[in-house]
Amino acid sequence: MENNVFEQMARRYDTEERIELAKVIVKEVRSELQNSKSKSLLDYGSGTGLISLELSDLVADILLVDSSKEMLEVAKAKVSHKGITNAKVLYSDFTQETPELKADIVIMSLVLLHIPDTQKILQELFNILNNGGKLMIIDFDKNEKIHHPKVHNGFSHDDLKKKLSEVGFKSTEIKTFYQGNHIFMNQHASMFLSSSIK
């Protein structure tokens, strides 16, 4: 992944628009995490923790994983500022090498579109999950208006379901839960939540 781009953006990453979008995502994800008090959550591509740090009251512990040290520095400052005691950060990029980790829930919010080999990362995340664990992916629905050399233009629900089942997930439910203007490369777009059980 083009790290340096995210390194440079880190300090000014939490724009008003991103914070607003994160609130929408957090609201959707919170309803999926009821009865998860004893569970561990891994946020892959956590960035500055805009999503997972808002979920820290729902789970036993959170690991924020990102391939940008700068983003994680911002996340660490938030953890300390908010007095969150059950969150840690890990500098890692599973597309290069995956550390020995286990989690009950893995969340990946607006990250898959940046990863060229989606199949490989889905396999890595499947391997990290405990049996019965849940992978939650929040991303954009396929959008033909978007063309970018380094970013997928969203995902079709059927294609994603197929990929998830190929890596071994038993069941996947996908639903579109939000649409808005200028949220994906300045285009009108919709976001989905995909929830898969290992």
Image: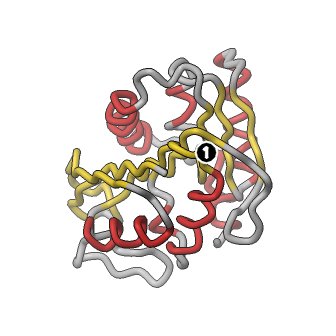
Residue at 53% over, 78% down: 116
Q: Position of residue 11 (x, y in %)?
A: 65, 45
Instruction: Find residue 169 and report its image quarter.
Output: bottom left
Instruction: Please state if 136 lies on the left or on the right of 100 as rendered.
Output: left
The residue that label 1 is drawn on is 130
In the foreground, 103 or 62: 103
Residue at 59% over, 22% down: 38
Residue at 68% over, 52% down: 66
Instruction: Find residue 1 and report its image quarter.
Output: bottom right
Q: Position of residue 118 (x, y in %)?
A: 50, 73
Instruction: Please state if 114 lies on the left or on the right of 152 as rendered.
Output: right
Q: Secondary structure at mark 1?
A: strand
Residue at 30% over, 63% down: 186
Please name the amino acid that badge 1 sits on.
Asn
Instruction: Please state if 181 lies on the left or on the right of 57 as rendered.
Output: left
Q: Position of residue 6 (x, y in %)?
A: 63, 60
Residue lying farthest to the top in this orientation: 83
Q: How many marks?
A: 1
Residue lying farthest to the bottom in this orientation: 149
Instruction: Find residue 4 and report its image quarter.
Output: bottom right
> How many residues crowd mark 1 within 10 Å: few (<14), some (14–19), many (20+)?
some
Q: Is residue 25 above or below residue 112?
A: above
Q: Position of residue 29 (x, y in %)?
A: 38, 35
In the foreground, 75 or 173: 173
